[in-house]
Image (cartoon, helix red, strand yellow):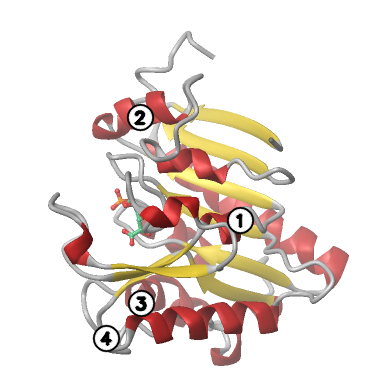
Amino acid sequence: MGRRAIVTHPSRETLFDDAAAQIETAIDSACRARDRAFVVLTGGSTIPPVYERLAQSVGIDWNRAELFWSDERCVPPDHPDSNYGMTKDVLLEPAGVPEANIHRFDGEEPDRERAAAAYAAEIEAALAEDDPRFDLIVLGMGGDAHVASLFPGHPLIDETERWTGVVSADDFDIPEPVIDRLTLTPRALHATREVLLIVTGTKKAPAVHGALGTVRDPTQWPAQLVDGPDSRVTWLLDADAAAEIEGEL
Ligand code: 6PG
């Protein structure tokens, strides 16, 4: 396993400030070292305040940041459930990110497998051939410990070859996901220098406890998949999300 840090913030505001600062630093370091930054963004309801902060930042050279997504719901980009659509409204447009740097899943493509394969090809074409890695993957986590759209018990948890996959809503008899999704696989989540996992709220405390516990079982806690062999993983938690691990680490 690579290196792991767990940072607990007393408030969500300081957590969001820290998350935005860490993303800015990762982009800046990558640009200094390799001229461009390859960053994977997440969807979900926790992340928009972080994107709002990034949009306000004057220190980021968006011309040199190539942006991808961890997963996408199979809806058109202007649908309220679109992760790309949310990011566009809160970050891409306000920050003026160039169109050419935006690499989104084709959520509206009816042939899901085709959309997943096309995204894998886009990733492979963008990343360095001799060292195909992202610089940073930003993720949220669900109350069931899913990350990206890798849900407990789903076969994609064991995917080690392909970069992307399809999660069909028919695969589940649980409330999530209610619509088909496209997602990065564990193979892609491991292909990064750094992961930033942002988790808030009491409802996620049991999943944080399980994912960070001593028993390794990504089928039950897919968030454990973030521990790639060579990446630095930072968990950013608020006090509520960290409630069940206090005193244990
Ligand atoms: C999505 C995500 C997903 C999300 C978690 C946390 O499309 O929903 O990419 O993995 O990050 O479910 O979501 P919340 O922030 O809404 O709790």
From this view, report whether residue 21 is shown above or below residue 30: above
Give the quadrant of residue 189: bottom right
Question: Comparing marks 3 and 4, which lies closer to the viewer?
Answer: 4
* Disc on res. 241: 2
Q: Position of residue 200 (x, y in %)?
A: 35, 38
Give the quadrant of residue 18: top right
Cα separation, mark 3 vs mark 1, equals 19 Å
Q: Secondary structure at mark 1?
A: helix
Q: Amino acid at mark 3?
A: Asp
Cα separation, mark 2 vs mark 4, equals 32 Å
Q: Position of residue 25 (x, y in %)?
A: 70, 54
Q: Earlier in the sequence, mark 3 or mark 4?
A: 4
Residue name at image x 28 percent, y 40 percent: 144
Q: Amino acid at mark 1?
A: Ile
Q: Position of residue 222 (x, y in %)?
A: 42, 43
Is disc 1 surrounded by few (<14), some (14 to 19) or many (20+) residues within 10 Å? many
Q: Earlier in the sequence, mark 3 or mark 1?
A: 1
Q: Amino acid at mark 4?
A: Pro
Q: Which residue is mark 1?
A: 23
